Image (tube, grey):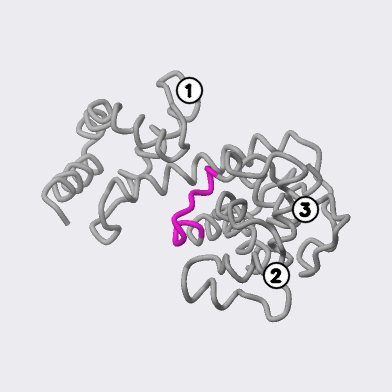
Amino acid sequence: MDDKKIKDNYRALEAGRDKGKKEAFLFDEQEHILRLTARILKRSVYDSDEEYSLALLAVSEAIDSFDDSKGAFWNYAALVIKRRIIDNMRKDAGHMPELSVSPETFSGDFTDDDDSVSIGIVRQIAGKTASYVDNSLRDEIEALSDELEGYGIDLFELPAIAPKTEKTRRSCIELLKSFFSPPPLTDELKRTGTLPMKEMVRRSGESRKLAERFRKYLIAAVLVRSGDYDEIGEYISLGN
């Protein structure tokens, strides 16, 4: 750990023991918290935004619960910020009607007329959830976020990289069908950390250029489809 991280850890520990130092820490680090929140959300964040207020609360919470076993303070604080923002999104979604879900969502079968599009699960994770909150859903969202990070993908960037047209959505479906066609390519993805593009393109007949364009999105869709994310599948609309 470099000197700056050691210094930040020390300041955070001191702030956790002294209310005055905590207030000073939060005041001094306002710009840092703004930049960190913007990186997490992958968009500009201003001090008037609700997300900034949530981030301040999250950093305050991180200070209270931080100890040396948690590694670098700001890495830990970023995780707490993400959790608070996810919780807030789910709370806001509680005002929406409960969303319908196809029973075939996790059956492993793709059909050409499946307008629900299994990859639509991922596109809406950051924006739509159930009309009530439970810990298992939160655990799944956090687990998926962690798994995505292993592939260099941030949960919050998925809506921006989703296919927007019917043509590209259909092409992504064909690529996903090819991934799960016997023999499925899951082991190769886990082993290499990358999509087996050449084989998927060969099986599907879709273009390599399109597959590369939606690489992150396809990986996310595969992880949701093949992982233990039953709660996410149950409470996220697949119809849009």
Residue at 76% across / 45% down in the picture? 167
Asked if the residue under mark 1 is in contact with the one under mark 3, i.e. CB atoms within 8 Å, the reply is no
- How crowded pointer 1 is (Cα within 10 Å; few <14, some 14-19, many 20+) is rated as few
Q: Quadrant of residue 87?
A: top right
Label 3: element kind: loop
Q: Which range of residues does the magenta coloring cover? A: 148-157
Closer-to-camera residue (106/230): 106
Q: Is residue 150 inside the magenta stretch?
A: yes
Q: CA distance from mark 3 to mark 1?
A: 33 Å
Q: Say above or below: 194 vs 31.
A: below
Closer-to-camera residue (108/142): 108
Q: Which mark is residue 203?
A: 2
**Between discs 2 and 1, the one toward the N terminus:** 1
Q: Say above or below: 82 vs 108.
A: above
Indicate the amino acid at tag 3: Val
- How crowded pointer 2 is (Cα within 10 Å; few <14, some 14-19, many 20+) is rated as some
- The residue indicated by pointer 3 is 117
Residue 152: x %, y % from top left: 44, 55
- The residue indicated by pointer 1 is 49
Residue 27: x %, y % from top left: 26, 26
Q: Quadrant of residue 98?
A: top right
Label 1: element kind: loop
